[in-house]
Image (spheres, rainbow, N blue to C red):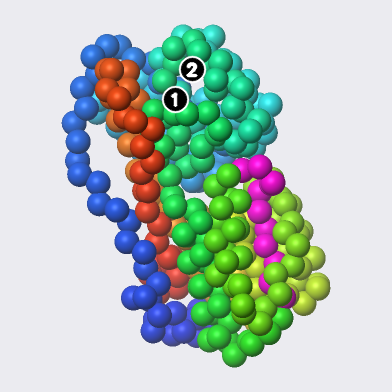
Amino acid sequence: MKKQILAALCAAAMLGSMISAPAFAEETVTANGEYKIALITMDSVDQHWVSLKEGAQAEAEADGVTVDFMAPDVKDDAKQIECINNAVAGGYDAIIVAANSEDAISGALQEAIDAGIKIIYVDSPANVPAEATFSTDNKAAGFTAGEQMLQALEEKGITEGSIGIININTSTNSTLMREEGFREALEGSPFEILETQYCEGDAAKAQTIAENYLTEGVVGIFGANEGAATGTGNAIKANDSDDVVGVGFDKSDTLKGLIADGYLYCTMAQNPDVMGKLGVQAAIKALNGEDLGGAVTDTGVSVLNAENVE
């Protein structure tokens, strides 16, 4: 019954809720040499990074280059720095990287640049210049998440109360921008945003945080990445909290199931496979000697809800 009610509530707003992903023309890229490219994401576990890897490796196979996935098993600055150092020592020509912390890994990336390695950012940049960046406009997407929260609360007839935010940490640029956009969307509303809690991207930690929020009587929770969103949905499910709105970020089979079952209102679905594909193309161009000018490309996001989750 919950699923049918939620679907009906979402249907009227669906057309206005979608943000079209940019259309990218098919492009053939030819490598001028036998290039070795390292792909280092925040971790190797989240489905978001697996999809990014698959997009990168499919493009690498089409272009005749090697892309090795060298991500750490958990989100950890020291482990990510170790991966970067291993790529430098291994003689890689380019590194495609999603920075866990824009400050923490910048020194290691600068050493890679000094060694002649080309740097391409996907999803989340660090604080040193790169050849190009392919990512979601995270602040805009966070603002949309906030709008979705307000819409869901209005549909439930909830006019006041507190809202919790679960983020990764205080240093991951992409999720910090999502939180900033989310907060901006709720400025001037009658809802109070509680102090942000951090889960390091771990779904189990996020569920504990969300359950604590539920104990405090929140009316909504925003999970700023896949792990945070999964924990949020699982907490709402475990507590059967029909009146609490969960809004998430990223896309996975688990999140889609939580939306279909009515425990999350929606999630902001990125296009990690496109990030991976375009990242490989950019790495090859840079290695071929093309100046990419440090361009930043928005790879798009859409609202995934009960109406379109199937």
Look at the numbered disc 2 and give the secondary structure of its residue. Answer: helix
Residue type highlighted by circle 2 = Ile
Residue at 38 percent across and 41 percent down: it is 296
In-front residue for pair 106/59: 106
- The image quadrant that residue 18 belongs to is bottom left
* Amino acid type of the residue that numbered disc 1 sits on in the rendered structure: Ile
In the rendered structure, which segment of residues is drawn in magenta? 162-172
Residue 66 — which label? Answer: none
Does the magenta run of residues contain 90?
no
**Residue drawn at point x = 61 percent, y = 77 percent:** 188
Is 292 or 66 nearer to us in this picture?
Answer: 292
The reply, left or right, for residue 31 in relation to residue 202 is left
Marks 1 and 2, the one that precedes in the sequence: 2
Residue 215 in percent (x, y) is at: 81, 72
Residue 163, magenta (yes or no): yes
Q: Give the crowd class for mark 2: few <14, some 14-19, many >=20 residues within 10 Å.
A: some
Mark 1 crowd level (few <14, some 14–19, many ≥20, 10 Å Cα): many
Figure check: 201 above or below 84: below
Residue placed most toward the observer, 91 or 229: 91
Give how far across and how far down residue 284 sits, in percent.
30, 23
Q: Which mark is residue 113?
A: 2
Do the CB atoms of the residues marked 1 and 2 lie less than 8 Å apart? yes
Residue 301 position by quadrant: bottom left
> How many numbered discs?
2
171 is higher (above) or lower (below) than 145: above
Question: Residue 199 appears at what percent x and percent y?
Answer: 71, 50
- Percent across and percent down for residue 264 are 56, 69
* Rendered residue at 67%/78% (across/down): 191
Given the current orientation, which residue lies at the most extreme bottom position? 157
Check the image and report above or below for 137 versus 55. Answer: below
Decide if residue 128 is in sight here: yes
Numbered tag placed on residue 119 in the rendering? 1
